[in-house]
Amino acid sequence: MKSLLNKLFENHSLIYKTVLFILSVVAIVYLFPKGSQFKYQFQKGKIWQYDDFVAPFDFAIQKSDEELSAEKQEIIDHQMLFFTYNDGIVSKVKENYKSKFDITFDNTSIPSQEKQKLLRISKKFIDQVYKWGLITANNSYTIKDTERLISLKKGNEVRTIPYSLLFDSKKIDEELLLFFKSQPNSSYKKKNIHVIQAVLKQNVFFDKTFTDNALQEVLNALLPTKGFIPKNSTIISQGETVEGNKFRQLESIKKEYESKTWSASNYLWLVTAYTFLISLVLIMLFLFLKKYRPEIYENNSKLSFLFINIVLVILLSTLVLNFSINYLYVVPYVILPLIIKAFFDARLGLFTHVLTILLVGFIVPNSFEFVFIQIIAGIVTILTVSELNKRANLFISVAQITGIYLLSYFAFSITQEGNVSNINWLNIGLFALNGMITASVVIPIIFTYEKLFGLISDESLREFSDSNNQLLRELNEKAPGTFQHSMQVANLAEAAAKEINANAILVRTGALYHDIGKMLNPMYFTENQSTSVNPHDELSPEYSAQIIIDHVIKGIELAKKHKLPDRLIDFIRTHHGTSFVYYFYKKELDINPDAINIANFKYPGPIPFSKETAILMICDAAEAASKSLKEPTALAIDNLINKIVRGQMDNGQFQNATITFKEIEQVKKVVKKKLNNIYHVRIEYPE
């Protein structure tokens, strides 16, 4: 049992990677659609490059979305409008007219015979108005053609009549003038017309509920198909152009494939195939990391970060596709390479982006178009985006990415549709929205990931390297000599890192903070001693050595107090490795050679474990030692650097660092060149 536990402990990193791999594969397979996939790739306007395609089964030709929309609009434009006729209102109108007529003309001098004639003609007009009914304007429907047929329900009878037979307020005014045209103009005639206008009421009403229900029944009965293709019929031959009816037939059979109900056996085969393909893609990422990014491969936290982001991108894609396939291009896929570039490097960002887009290509329509556009956008992202902390740079880069999106999609649409008029302008707007989302969320996401995974981005490093940072200002005030030393070391280390393709901004920032522990006892370090008084003269060599060694421990404590990231604290820990405080060790050896304790003169370590920390150790020692040269000639500097680096290598300071002998030689060459530039002799100017 104990041996088993030991083996598990020894291989815990490999076990973690295996579990991470399995969980990622399972999650992605779960998110993928489980329907069958049409095995042929085709695009409208392109040549069919496969063998003659014969229908493997009977299927119906599906109407396009445009055809269905046009047919639905046609039905809506010509739908039957339903109205109801109210007899009760007509009776009340007639009663009201008789009552008001009597009141109006009782006390007038109109002859009785003329009065009865006027009453008879008016009732005839009212009967004419209410033969089909009176209606008023209504926003619930629109009638462009007055001869359009409508359905009028009058009691138990339903009649289909032209809309023009109904009276409205405008028609009433016109008909009144015509109807009473033969009557002599008199005050009686005008009063009677006013009475008629006052009593007429709407009695025909639009039945919106019944109309909508009838329309919905017709729309529901609309067939989504427009033809039938029998089994063994040739759909398209090799070399033919995919367009028109052939394109619709191919689209229809593709939908049939994807909507087929699978048996348990077929479902199992599908899941197995997905598992194999996804595993293959993720194994490629593992192999890339192991060969080219071993420091990430060995770090389980960073590995988890990469795989979690891949799964999240696929999850987001699946959610958008389930909501609406039309909004696929609003997903900001370029955020993935942006984030990975910010935390690691451009090459890994692009490689991960390409693998992720290949996985998403399994589930999106027009996969070739999608993969092409997204990979091009990813490449542009890697090449253009830099210094995300500068808003102007970020927005300019996002604008360039959006432009590439638009140009790529525009070109694809032209090749497929043949003209500009058929371009889906919604996608153009989605690409613009995509750019705005990218610019808005990338910085908050990077900040969140820094807190969750303990990572630090290049943007944060640039902020930490600002000399106006509180801790660096304090170092400059309390230990100005140490601050100047740190600035010189930072410049040397940055140049050396660029020479061997290490992380230059990381090593520069680490160099600025590597000696912050000295600000607690600045006068015990020679670079801060402005007079000839040296406090070490009154101390024992062992106690002096302890003060010197403590600047590492106190620097770590100070860095943690100010919440510096661990990647920067690593530079404080390792910049002296396990080397000796040789000056005081030599003094103690002269005073007390028999009872000396070597451990009291040795830094606690650890030794450098990366290229960047190894570079800092070399540059720190070189810059400090160069100050001791009385005559800093090129030969003296060359011998000094060789001696320092040889001593560090002999003491095993670089055995854990991922730096090669060749890279060490390159670093030495850069340091020598920079120091020669610093100490070069100027000509003496005449007085």
Image (spheres, helix red, strand yellow):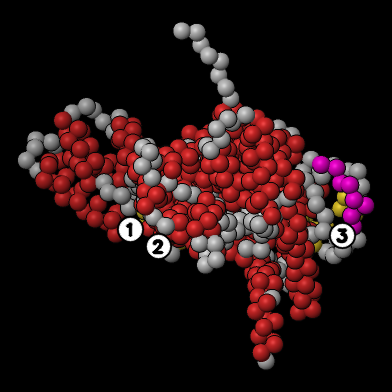
Q: Nearer the viewer, mark 3 or mark 1?
A: 3
Question: Mark 2 highlights which residue?
Answer: 155
Left or right: 395 with respect to 405? left
Q: Position of residue 47 (x, y in %)?
A: 85, 42
361 is higher (above) or lower (below) than 491: below
Q: Residue at x 12, y 41 (%)?
A: 105
Residue placed most toward the observer, 607 or 321: 607
Which amino acid type is marked by label 2? Gly
Which x, y percent locates residue 119?
Answer: 22, 43
Q: Amino acid at mark 3?
A: Ala
Of 426 and 396, nearer the camera is 396
> For the N terminus, which image quadrant?
bottom right
Mark whose residue sits in front, 3 or 2: 3
Residue 219: x %, y % from top left = 58, 57
Tell me the SS state at disc 3.
Answer: loop
Residue on which the image places disc 1: 87
Q: Is residue 241 above or below residue 36?
A: above
**Image quadrant where residue 479 sits:** top left
What's the mark number on residue 430? none
In the foreground, 72 or 382: 382
- Looking at the image, the residue that sits furthest to the top is 687
Query: Residue 279, percent across and down?
Result: 75, 66
Category of crowding for the residue at label 2, using alpha-carbon neighbours closer than 10 angstroms: few (below 14), some (14–19), many (at least 20): few
**CA–CA distance between discs 3 and 1?**
62 Å
Figure quadrant of residue 534:
top left
Real-space CA distance between mark 2 and mark 1, rounded to the nearest whole angstrom: 8 Å
- Which secondary structure type mostly characterizes the magenta part of the structure? loop
Label number found at residue 55: 3
Which range is magenta?
Answer: 46-54
Residue lying at 11% horizontally and 46% vertically, measured from the top left: 103
